[in-house]
Amino acid sequence: MPGLVHTYPDKVLLLAALNCAVYCRYCTRGRLVGSKGWTIPDETFQYLGKHTEIRDVLVSGGDPLLLSDTELDELFSKVRKIPQIRTIRLGSKLPSVQPSRITPELADILAKHRVWLQLHVIHPDELTEEMTRALDTLAGAGVPMVSQTVLLKGINDSADTLTDLFYGLLERRVKPYYLFQCDPITGSSAFRTPVEKGLQLIRELQARVSGLALPHYCIDAPGGGGKITLLPNSQFRREGSEIVLTNYEGKEYRYPDNETVS
Ligand code: SF4
């Protein structure tokens, strides 16, 4: 369907806007973004209505917060009319790069339609006073927020930088949700870290930040495989009837397992 990506059974990506306030070198949608504006056709909403397995709609683009308040209100109203859809999320970088877009009126529209905001934030330097005020407006209106970060060599690939970023987000009532491996797209090679670096950072973060501040470290599998979460090491193994667990310090603990799976 035009403007729709349906990879997982229960969730879809709705491409609501094709332009952005900034264009990121590591963007995986470079082939799409930067085009002229467009409107999602009715047939796409009809598809959503017919597919009763769809529960979660991520409104994305481009950056959908570049749409006007009226356009967003109409878009969310159309999605909210579809009874099986339980969750609407909206992905945006605007609270960081154009915080003046976050007005009390916009926050009220997001809250009215119970939209989760998924912020794209890379570095703690983005957490400026202006962005903090924007996030206060959103949180004050009751908009739930999570974040996504791309791991970038020389930019944020240190435990200190990521600790600052994730605690800074939590302080501003944003739950760090995803840390993405930078994809191998044209022009991104200077930013790409080895996967082992990401795993090492997650190991370090596990030892120093609250679980609330720890995102999932994911690779978006090529060829439409979807997001796959990577864990730093096998944190358990079975020995007889026991599970041997490894904690953040590398120490092992034995846990008596329930013997049968019902
Ligand atoms: S804001 Fe998002 S969609 Fe736009 S260029 Fe950056 S990564 Fe791509």
Image: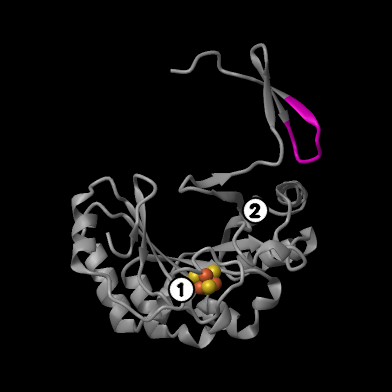
Q: Which mark is residue 33?
A: 1
- Specify the quadrant of the image occupied by residue 172: bottom right
Q: Which residues are magenta?
A: 246-253
Residue neighbourhood size for the residue with mark 1, other residues' Cα within 10 Å, grouped as few (<14), some (14–19), many (≥20): some
The secondary structure making up most of the magenta span is loop
Expressed as whole percent of the image width and height from the top left, the position of residue 89 reads 40, 63
- Check if mark 2's residue and mark 1's residue have beta carbons within 8 Å: no
On screen, residue 54 versus residue 94, left or right, reads left
Residue 249 part of the magenta-drawn span: yes
* Dot 1 beta carbon under 8 Å from ligand 1: yes
Residue 214: mark: 2
Three-letter code for the amino acid on which mark 2 is drawn = Leu
**Nearest-to-viewer mark from 2 and 1:** 1
Residue at the image point whose x is 48% and y is 18% from the top: 261
Q: Is residue 58 above or below residue 20?
A: above
Mark positioned earlier in the residue sequence (2 or 1): 1
